[in-house]
Every structure is written in C-alpha cells, then in structure tokens.
Image (spheres, rainbow, N blue to C red):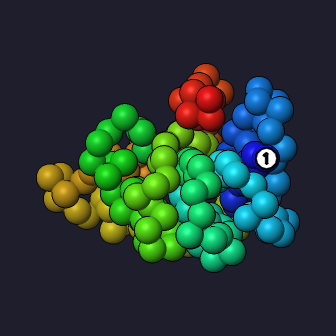
Amino acid sequence: MKIIIYGTQYGAAKKYAEELSRRTEIPYVSYEEIEDINIYDTIVYIGSLYAGGVQGMKKTMAKYDAGTDKKLIVVTVGLADPTDKENTDHIKGGVKKQLPDGVYEKATVLHLRGAIDYTKLNYKHKTMMGLLVRKAKNLPEEKKNAEVRAMIETYNQVVDFVDYESLSSIIDELR
C-alpha cells in the first residue's frame, strides 16, 4: 500500500499532494490526520519548508519504524530554486536532522518550488519573515545563497512557483 502525506502551513504542499494523488491514484492525507504510517510500504512525504525544517515531518517520522525496508520519498516545497546544489544541500541537512537514525540514507529526497502570499501569513510568520529578511539584506553578498536571495526577492509579494510538471520526478521514483 502507498500513501502521500503532506505538511503545509499555507497550501502549496497540499496542492502538490492533491495533484500527485490525482495522477497516481494514491490517497493523500495531512500529517495531522495520519494514524499508522507503518501499514504502508511506500510513503511519499510532501512538506513545506519552514525555519530550516519540513512542516510536520519530525512529528510524523516519530511514528515511523526505522527498522523496516519501506520506500520513503521526502519532497520539500520551498521558494528557492531546487536546481541550485548549494540550496538543496542545505535543505538535505535539515531533512536529515528530522528523520530517525538510519532513515535518511535509505530515503529519496526531492525538491519542488512552492508559493508564498504575504497577505495570508499570520502575525507570527509575518514578523519572523520581516526579521529574517532584514538580517538577510545585511549579509555580505558572498554569504547570500540562493535561498536567502529568493527570500529577499519575494518579500512582501504574492509569488507562486507551483509547477505540476515537476511531479514527474516523484512519479518516476514511484515506479
């Protein structure tokens, strides 16, 4: 059995989960609603990136039996370009910290671009993003990686990089 689990704050990861489900006929569920992930032999976890982590993944993976040979595909959803190796290396470091010991080495980690609408951010996230952008703008140019530049460029805007054609890499991995 296969399952798509998603973790999202503002909706981009859920959009990807819904479309992947439509294309593959694999059911999808929020990480907040999943009960027993160990009944599935293939798990696709699609999660939005927040503060260096993947939304809901740590909580979900706390239920995961790391001693099994399940297929785990972790898909991050963020603003920065997923073709930038420095960016994906940074993201993978955060993913590794959220997975139980030994699981990261067996998992496939993929990256998709997401969306942000600053008008829909709650007060806490607006404040946090404002502080992060202010700090990022003060960094020397050589310290600004793709993720930092994307955050600065998209600040206070409505940006949607969701691209359903990028789901093909996940579908290929599921075969």
**Which residue is located at x 37 percent, y 34 percent?**
83
The answer to whether residue 159 shows anywhere in this view is no
Percent position (x, y) of residue 17?
73, 42
Query: Which residue is the site of mark 1?
Result: 1
Q: Position of residue 84 (x, y in %)?
A: 32, 39
Mark 1: amino acid: Met
**Residue 108 x, y percent position in the rendering:** 48, 47
- Tell me which residue sits at (32%, 52%) in the image: 89
Picture quadrant where residue 5 is located? bottom right
Q: Secondary structure at mark 1?
A: loop
Rendered residue at 44%/68% (across/down): 102
- Which residue is drawn at the image coordinates 57% and 57% (left, top)? 69
Q: Is residue 2 left or right of residue 100?
A: right
Looking at the image, which is closer to me, 153 or 82? Answer: 82
Relative placement, left or right, of 33 versus 86 is: right
Asked if 110 appears above or below 66 in the picture, the reply is above
Instruction: Please tell me which residue lies in front, 105 or 95.
Output: 105
Q: Quadrant of the C terminus?
A: top right
Q: Is residue 111 visible?
A: yes
Q: Is 121 above or below relative to 67? A: above
Question: Would residue 153 be found to the left or right of residue 28 on screen?
Answer: left
